Image (cartoon, rainbow, N blue to C red):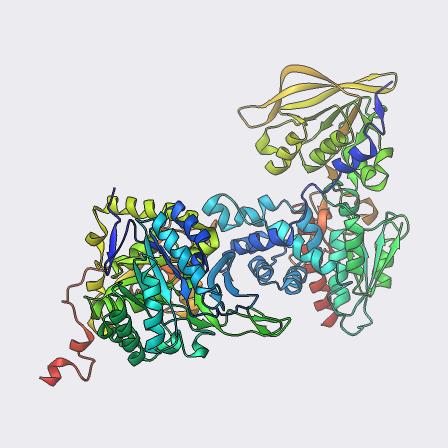
Amino acid sequence: MANLRCNLGGIVSPNPFWLASAPPTDKAYNVVRAFEAGWGGVVWKTLGEDPPVVNVSSRYGAISYKGQRMAGFSNIELISDRPLQVNLEEIARTKRDWPDRAMVVSLMVPCQEENWKAILPRVEDTGCDGIELNFGCPHGMSERQMGSAVGQVPDLVEMVTGWCKRYTRLPVIVKLTPNITDILVPAAAARRGGADAVSLINTIQSITGVDLDRMCPMPVVDGLGTHGGYCGPAVKPIALRMLGDIARDMPDLALSGIGGIATWRDAAEFIALGATNVQVCTAAMHYGFKIIEDLVDGLSNWMDEKGYASLDAMRRRAVPNYVHWNDLNLNFRTVASIDQQLCIGCGLCYIGCEDTSHQAIRVSRQTGGNRYEVIDQDCVGCNLCHLACPVEGCITMVPQRSTSPALTWAEHPANPLRRESQQ
Amino acid sequence: MADIAACRLSAEELAANFADANPPLTAAQAAVEAQRCFFCHDAPCIKACPTGIDIPSFIGKIATGNLRGSALTILEANILGGSCARVCPTEELCEQACVRDAQEGQPLKIGLLQRHSTDWLMERATTPFARAPATGHRIAVVGAGPAGLACAHGLARYGHEVTIFEAKHRAGGLNEFGIAAYKLTDDFAQRELQFVLGIGGISIEYEQALGRDFTLDTLRRQFDAVFLGLGQAVAQGLGLRGEQAAGIRNAVDFIADIRQRPRAEVAVGRRVVVIGGGNTAIDAAVQARLLGAEEVTIVYRRGPEHMSATLEERRWAQTNDVLIRLWATPVRLSVAEGTVAGVEFARTRLDAAGRLIHSGEEFHVPADMVLKAIGQRGLLDPLGGALALNGDRIAVDSDQATSLPGVYAGGDCVPGTDLTVSAVEDGKRAAEAIHRRLSA
């Protein structure tokens, strides 16, 4: 059985699966249930200063796609709406009862040094393992100059991170907002401020839909709607890309991956692209804490199968292969191949190629159904048919043997700025 | 005295037995099922539908909640989409072609989805179609079955005036008289008839039979075109002595009785033998069981692969405890005091040349009631040889035109499969051809 222990900036947990700072970690009752189920750690729902914030009723929205509920999920909930002292006492008690689990406390107070200086010792007193700075919440709190309003200003990220490093001995994780143009800039700011790790992504500003009867953005609060923070399986590609950018450019910065992780396979992908551990929320909110069982043994079984003895053995394995477009080989060619034995005759490969791509699939009408065949010389290897085909393994992309050496855009004759011409 | 009686079961049992055999999908079920459709290009299911309904489109519209659009997609191609959704042998048509069947052995429930959409619309609209301005053309349609109604509706949409002559006291044809009650519950055939007539421009003359009340010649003189949807009016006989004995009936009459009379009034034997291998045999046998017969046996002279009843139908019969005996043909009727007491069957087999022969072995099946379901034929005598025939049916071309100019025919009185959906297609195609002829 593979070793799933991990250490994120000095915070150790028995497995890499933490519950993200969110409603599932709002109080001891939930967190204890999560630990009983087997979660490796939690980031306690963000604490702020008293008096606590007030939340609205009607807080979540979601995208359902072709029968899949909550493919994308959004919330307009704010930080913890319980008194600070209540949270601190529950954190202390829960950490005492579950010493082997990672207990990280998410924080958000105004951008004043005294405010941070005041709250940090109280948090440290709980015996928690680290803090996470919520620079990501994109709704409500940002309108009060906190959350993503801080995360979007690199100087503020650096400054607040610096205060935290000064006023607590606890490891500091900076949670980054994706609502920016270049994730590398706030990540670098966090590193300059002394962050032990960054976690990403926080939620994406979003409107999940419009209620066409009430003509109102969703979720609807008494006839009105506001933008929320988007997460869930739909955001995973966005999260992976931002994570990959940091992993590639700042290999020394520890990363906690967040964004649409629902299965062990998702987690393996984040870890392969540089994450030390992962944080989960939407999947747990959808199915309950029991999903940890498959997250842990699915990852472990897969690692055993692949021969990875520990997470370190597989971490960052995909990072070297994440390159800029300019570094791709333009002489590479792949061609679709249809397995006629597996083909069920739905024609989706054909119509997609015919209407929207390269007219590289021909149809012959035969008794017993249409036969679809790839016209090899016209196939540009775009993958569309392979992606649209509903039968697993029916359309495969076959890399073609190339007689030419790899050729990037930088070297390509069609590139007016190619290196040769510059020489 | 044969043991034939009505009211073998309580009113509650009868109501339960004759409830919808294939209940409608709930909105939630329809939504889940519709999501399974791949929205195939050049979809095999469309090609498998005699009326060519654009099945992926109507299912896609269910998935998006566009039920009106979904129903119109169906009804544009098949105005009797509601009854076809209920009575089509979908397992041999669209659902057999569904690529999901090839992929996972579980086709889309196309029939039930079609019912979902058409029911939705029929609960909300008398007709979704508008009539074109009146053309002044008048067309006679003989027979108010699926073929005649489809033809009449198509013509009425174009603004023509249609008179339907129906020999019976009610319209609907086999949908009204010839289909098992549990397939078309809640008087669906009549509700659908009203829906079809909702377009306007169609009148029905009841109890007007060709050859008795009018002739083809009169119709040709009085109307601009004629469509014959005569159906198959005459049940075949066994050709055995004693066939007139009490307790022996045509299965089609028994089925019509169940549709036309209060169920508690329909008499059924304690032991029933049904002779035949088609869906009529199944409908008669199962309904005999549901009326309270204790033992019901279908006897068919060949093997399962030769039965015209579909596998689905045979399973349905077996689920209802009907015994199906194969490779046996009736040779004698046991009649006592003018009443049937049983049937002697000879076992059959195929000889080397593939001909059906008696094997020489016989067996007896006691029966209080014998239902004959060995096929029907058309009543073509009233046509007086005016039309060219193809076998014992009216010959038609691809426009459903007969050998007489201006006379068209469709449904079970012409060659081809005897299905409601095929009859609708015939009627639809004839309407198009007649309209073209009149517009020329």
Residue A211 to residue B107: above or below: below
Tell whether B113 sits left or right of B222.
Answer: left
- Residue at the limit of the structure toward the right, as seen here: B213
Callout count: 0
Residue B292 vs residue A328: left or right?
right
User: In the rendered image, which quarter is residue A405 located in?
Assistant: bottom left
Q: Position of residue B300 (x, y in %)?
A: 66, 27
Q: Position of residue B55 (x, y in %)?
A: 58, 57
B322 w.r.t. B24: above or below: above
Whether residue A350 can be seen here:
no
Q: Is residue A314 above or below residue A384?
A: above
Q: Quadrant of residue B332?
A: top right
B384 or A298, nearer to the observer: A298
- Residue B367 visible, this angle: yes
Front residue (pair A110, B21): A110
Quarter of the image with the N terminus of chain A in it: top left
User: Who's the residue at 87% across and 19% down the image?
Assistant: B338
Which quadrant would the C terminus of chain A be assigned to in this image?
A: bottom left
Query: Left of A292 or right of it: where is B125?
Result: right
Q: Residue A195's image quarter? A: bottom left
A258 or B52: nearer the viewer: A258
